[in-house]
Each structure stands twice: as structure tokens, then as C-alpha cells.
Image (cartoon, rainbow, N blue to C red):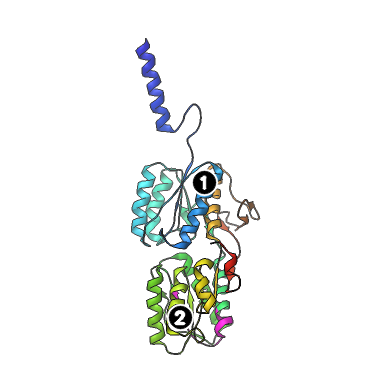
């Protein structure tokens, strides 16, 4: 009889371990947040925010991604995470199309799927967390450029990865806007990829400076890009001739802002974006969807489009030599 009781108790313990139930308590929720890549300042700041949300909410947050902007590696990592039975996956795709099959697999496994920072296939996500309205932000970058270089002359765009949907959205919106509002601007060549690396952006900027001697401006889209362009302009002593603007963190931008090789940087707080992503994923697991005007703790009021799944965190901030020191990210 005693042996039978022991066997029953052992079976219950095994069942509890397998299902995450211990003494009637449900297992901790596990949310995966995957950036395009780990190890660059922008996504490091997002990691801090995402993990802080995990602590505040009492849930597990796995923040992981490839060390380079590699969609194939994202797929491999997501396959492994799906097999571990996580509750939600929030991903910033390097190539949305490349990730569609694995995201379909996640949904089939009952895992909530969100994108953040960069949109995936809209039909596959339960929520899409945008840091900004893409059209507004793209136009804002072109307005900054014109403010610094004037509305006439040659300019270039250095981007991150050519498949990044968020970067492409900003650039497409800016180009369409400039065609109407700033018709005397002349884009000297197609957008130039930097593979999300400052050193590559620096070299590409040097190539542009050499190839186009009348270049008056560079827009850097993706956080390493304006820094690399500013580095090249600084090295060549052209800060008075070539205006560099773009999407960058204030702490990284500060040395270039202070000497004028980067005229202005614009972004949002990536820590808040990471925090918001985890909060909304956790809410979704509880059956709660975001609403327009919702005030999220540690983030602020958010916008939600009529589709019910597109979330806008808020407007950008501009960083200059005068205010960059006031920011801690």
C-alpha cells in the first residue's frame, strides 16, 4: 500500500514538473523578446527595459537574438524556443518574409506572436508594437535634413539592412514626402546598406564623399548609420559642408553632436519600447488587448490603430549638442 502511495506521489511530482504546476500554482509565464541582433547599444537598451518589465510583472523574459543581423539565425533560434514551449514570442525580423514559416509554426503551437521595433507579416501577429508612426517619422527625418543643409542639393541615405521593414517604411515615406515638399533635393544613389554596423556605415560614407564631391547631406537610418557617417565627415573635416542627421541614441551621438559632425539625432527611448512590448505581451496572454489612449506604467499613453493590433508608442525626441547630456540611453 505504501509503495502505491509513493508511486502516486511521484507521478504527481513528475506531472507538476511537466506542466509547471506546483502546489496549485501555475508556472511562470515566459515571454521571448528577440531583437534583430544583440550587442549594439540600441538593442542593449531595449533589453534593459524588457527585463525590467519581467521583474515588475513577476514573469520570465528571455531576451535573445543573433549576433549579426541574420534572419536565418533568427529562424533557427525561434525553432528552438518553440520546442521549449514558451508562451509568447516578440520578434524584430531582419527579413519578415524569411520568418513567416517559423511564426506560423509558433501560432500553430498556441504561442502568442508579436512583432516589435520592426513589423513582421501582419496576418501572422497578434500585436504589432511600433515605436513611432512610420510615415510621420520618415517625414521628420527629411525635415531635419532640410533644416540643416537647405532644400536644394545632393544628399544620400545610409540604412541598416535592405530587408528591414521599419527602415524601409521610414525611407519610403521620406522619399515620397521630399518629392512633393522638397523637389530640389537630389538623391545621388539608391539607399546604401550598412549591415547595422557603424564601421560599415563609416566606410560607405567615405565612398559617397569621394564619389559625389557636391554632397551636402546624409541621412542615417538605423542607429549605427548616422554615427558612421558622422565619423567619416569628422575625419575628412567636412562638418561645415556635409550635414549628417538620423536615427541614433543620444549617448552614442554626443561626441559627434558636440563637434557638429552630426547635426541632430532623432529617436525614442528603446528601453521604454522593450518594456512596453513585454507588458502588452503579458496582457495579451491574460486576454487583455491594448486600447487607444491607454496609459502604460513607465511608458506613457499609447495609440492603437483601428485594426486593434497596431500599437504606436509615441512621438520621437530630437537630440542636439545642447540636450544630449540630459538623456541616459
Counting residues from the N terminus, which is met first, the one under dot 2 or under dot 1?
1
Residue 126 shows in the view: no
User: Residue at the spot x=47%, y=29% of the render?
Assistant: 22
Please report the bounds of the magenta region as a residue range.
Answer: 145-158
Depth check, front residue: 321 or 241 = 321
The stretch drawn in magenta includes residue 154:
yes
* 43 with respect to 304 (left or right): left
Q: SS for tag 1?
A: helix
Relative placement, left or right, of 234 versus 280 is left
Picture residue at 60% right of the left edge, 73% below the top: 322
Any part of residue 243 in sight:
yes
Taking depth in this image into account, of 280 and 111 the one nearest to the observer is 280
Q: Position of residue 269 (x, y in %)?
A: 55, 61
Q: Relative to residue 160, is residue 240 depicted above or below?
A: below
* Residue 176 on image: x %, y %: 53, 77
Q: CA distance from mark 2 to mark 1?
A: 41 Å
> Hey, which residue is sitting farthest top in the picture?
1
Assess disc 2: are there few (<14), some (14-19) or many (≥20) residues with their C-alpha within 10 Å of its C-alpha: some
Residue under label 1, please give it. Answer: 54
In the rendered image, residue 87 lying in the magenta stretch gets the answer no
Q: Which residue is mark 2?
A: 234
Q: Which mark is residue 40?
A: none
Amino acid at each position: 500500500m505504501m509503495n502505491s502511495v509513493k508511486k502516486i506521489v511521484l507521478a504527481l511530482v513528475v506531472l507538476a514538473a511537466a506542466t509547471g504546476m506546483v502546489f496549485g500554482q501555475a508556472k511562470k509565464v515566459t515571454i521571448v523578446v528577440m531583437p534583430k541582433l544583440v550587442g549594439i547599444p540600441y538593442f542593449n537598451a531595449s533589453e534593459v527595459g524588457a527585463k525590467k518589465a519581467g521583474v515588475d510583472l513577476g514573469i520570465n523574459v528571455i531576451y535573445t537574438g543573433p549576433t549579426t543581423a541574420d534572419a536565418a539565425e533568427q529562424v533557427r533560434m525561434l525553432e528552438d524556443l518553440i520546442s521549449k514551449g514558451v508562451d509568447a514570442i516578440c520578434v524584430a525580423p531582419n527579413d519578415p518574409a524569411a520568418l513567416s514559416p517559423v511564426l506560423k509554426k509558433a501560432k500553430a503551437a498556441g504561442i502568442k506572436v508579436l512583432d516589435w521595433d520592426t513589423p513582421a507579416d501582419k496576418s501572422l501577429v497578434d500585436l504589432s508594437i511600433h515605436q513611432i508612426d512610420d510615415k510621420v517619422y520618415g517625414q521628420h527625418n527629411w525635415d531635419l535634413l532640410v533644416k540643416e543643409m537647405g532644400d536644394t542639393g545632393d544628399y544620400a541615405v545610409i540604412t541598416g539592412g535592405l530587408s528591414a521593414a521599419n527602415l524601409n517604411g521610414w525611407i519610403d515615406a521620406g522619399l515620397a514626402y521630399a518629392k512633393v515638399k522638397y523637389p530640389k533635393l537630389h538623391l545621388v544613389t539608391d539607399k546604401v546598406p550598412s549591415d547595422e554596423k557603424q564601421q560599415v556605415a563609416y566606410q560607405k560614407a567615405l565612398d559617397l564623399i569621394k564619389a559625389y564631391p557636391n554632397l551636402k547631406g546624409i541621412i542615417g537610418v538605423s542607429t549605427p548609420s548616422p554615427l558612421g557617417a558622422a565619423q567619416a565627415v569628422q575625419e575628412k573635416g567636412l562638418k561645415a559642408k556635409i550635414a549628417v542627421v538620423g536615427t541614433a541614441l543620444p549617448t552614442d551621438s554626443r561626441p559627434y553632436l558636440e563637434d557638429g559632425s552630426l547635426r541632430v539625432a532623432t529617436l525614442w527611448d528603446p528601453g521604454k519600447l522593450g518594456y512596453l512590448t513585454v507588458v502588452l505581451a503579458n496582457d495579451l496572454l491574460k486576454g487583455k488587448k491594448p486600447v487607444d489612449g491607454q496609459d502604460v506604467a513607465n511608458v506613457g499613453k499609447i495609440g492603437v490603430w483601428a485594426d486593434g493590433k497596431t500599437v504606436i508608442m509615441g512621438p520621437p525626441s530630437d537630440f542636439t549638442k545642447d540636450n544630449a547630456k540630459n538623456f541616459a540611453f
